[in-house]
Amino acid sequence: MSKTISIFDTTLRDGEQSAGVNLNAKEKLAIARQLVKLNVDVIEAGFPISSSSDFEAVKLISQEIKEVSIAALARANEKDIDRAWQALRFGQNPRIHTFIATSDIHMKYKLKLSPEKVLENAVMAVKHAVKYTSNVEFSAEDASRSDPDFLVKIFSEVIKAGATTINIPDTVGYATPEEFKKFVRYIINRVRDIGEVTVSVHCHNDLGLAVANSIAAVEAGATQIECTVNGLGERAGNAALEEIVMALKTRNDYYNTHTNIETRQIYRTSQLVSSLTGFSVQPNKAIVGKNAFAHESGIHQHGVLNEKTTYEIMSPESIGLPMNRIVLGKHSGRHAFRDRLEKLGYQLTQEEINKLFIKFKGIADKKRTIYDEDIEALMDIGGDNLNKYLTLERFQVSCGNASAPTSAVKLNFKGHSLQEVCIGNGPVDASFKAIEKALGISLTLEDYKIRSITEGKDALAEVIVHISRESKIFIGRAVAIDVIEASIRAYIEAINRMIAGLGDNFIPIQYNEEVI
Ligand code: KIV
Ligand code: ZN
């Protein structure tokens, strides 16, 4: 009989730890809701002791989501575990995930603790967590570089102390598939009472082997895989959920295992994570890349037209790739719009629908055909939640090949009008400079991305900017038909996130009441 492999999604914890990713609580909740539709088994929602915003996000998710077990991370000490529990306690079957490093290199240089003390702390942590919930996971950080016999000892002891899942992470992505399979098998064969617990793996992608290592571990007997949507995560990322799930599904003939994932939600989940994190998916990314189901060469096209399976090992429909995409136009009414939103899976209040409908009408006046992707792009999930300290009143740009690009922007900062005119290397640069000058600040633009949401000359443009200040990165995203407008709005959103992140004492230098 085909064996079930649990999917433990850590997009909101390890994924969110990626440099440059900074999701607010409402954005995390939107992703968590989508993960419920994807039917993951566990959602790791955050690391509550690490910041108050992480704490609040875990609390919100555990209050709102009852269909899936919510996990939170805690180091192996009482304070971390207490904090994790305070955030988690509202949830259904909440899981405390506690960890400590077990490799010589981490114990000696990072923890400065002897193996005996690490063992003692691990057991103490699990015993403490068990006082709150029977659903306790223990991870041996950097397991793949740890002494296997030490792991056997520590896992045996934490199981005795009450852990119900033991996790074997390849924290630095050092393992290779054959070796990791043997390693996991060695542990499974020796740990006392291993049959009573779930054996999990958590692989990072530093050598591009995270998915291969996770699947090799399944061959060795692991029954839970920790992974992230789009492979998001520290450094080169974590094992990509969509790749693991589709590999096990497509090659069920070989692995004889399956997951509970609703695979037709994969594409939508990938798009949502990409748009909220600002991390675009590379076109040739397996499963969810733009080209993953595109056939360019004539020979391939010919083959696919005759028989899809010549060049398609899975169908685009199986991951929920939109096939019939034309939905609404400028004559569509509020009813059709609400109906479409519901079909897309959004649960919105009447007030939210009304706000979105105004945006939709604005776009529909300028754009002939509105696709599902256009509608989704209008969903400003986290942005709506953001304090709008700074807003755009108007802008005017002039440029050409014989004149210096110039931009005049008029902004509103907490009720005060600010305006400036600047020249720049192009109209976007001139606009960003004008915004900075109006606020009397200097920002570093770390990244600027623009893409059209759908095809055609009237396609909506999505702009994602990353700005930095005080070595923190802030992301802004905006959608408009006009690329300059989308750029300015994205920049303003990033500044609003920055102000929210740096606190209310941010004061712009000039307050200018004049009207442009
Ligand atoms: O990579 C790692 O080891 C981790 C643990 C905390 C599970 O993320
Ligand atoms: Zn990790």
Image (cartoon, grey):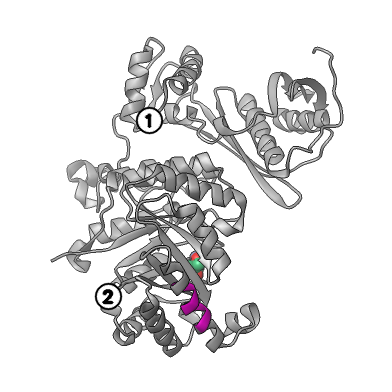
Callout 2: CB less than 8 Å from ligand 1: no
Q: Give percent across and percent down for residue 103.
A: 53, 82
The amino acid marked with disc number 1 is Gln
- Quadrant of the snapshot with the N terminus: bottom left
Callout 1: CB less than 8 Å from ligand 2: no
Q: Nearer the viewer, residue 447 or 377?
A: 377
The number of callouts visible is 2
Q: Give percent across and percent down for residue 409.
A: 75, 22
Q: Quadrant of residue 107?
A: bottom right
Q: Nearer the viewer, residue 419 or 415?
A: 415
Magenta stretch: give its range: 120-126
Q: Which residue is mark 1?
A: 347
Q: Residue at x 43, y 26 (%)?
A: 375
- Residue 196's disc number: 2
The amino acid marked with disc number 2 is Glu
Is 123 in the magenta? yes
Decide: is 109 above or below 212: below
Q: Residue at x 70, y 36 (%)?
A: 495
Q: Nearer the viewer, residue 495 or 70?
A: 70
Is any atom of residue 449 visible in this view?
yes
Q: Give percent across and percent down for residue 105.
A: 59, 83
The secondary structure type at the circle numbered 1 is loop
Q: Residue at x 21, y 46 (%)?
A: 308
**Magenta stretch secondary structure, dominant:** helix
Name the residue furthest top.
331
Decide: is 303 above or below 458: below
For label 1, the crowd category at 10 Å Cα-Cα, with few meaning under 14, some 14 to 19 and many 20 or more, is few
Decide: is 371 above or below 354: below
Camera-nearest label, 1 or 2: 2
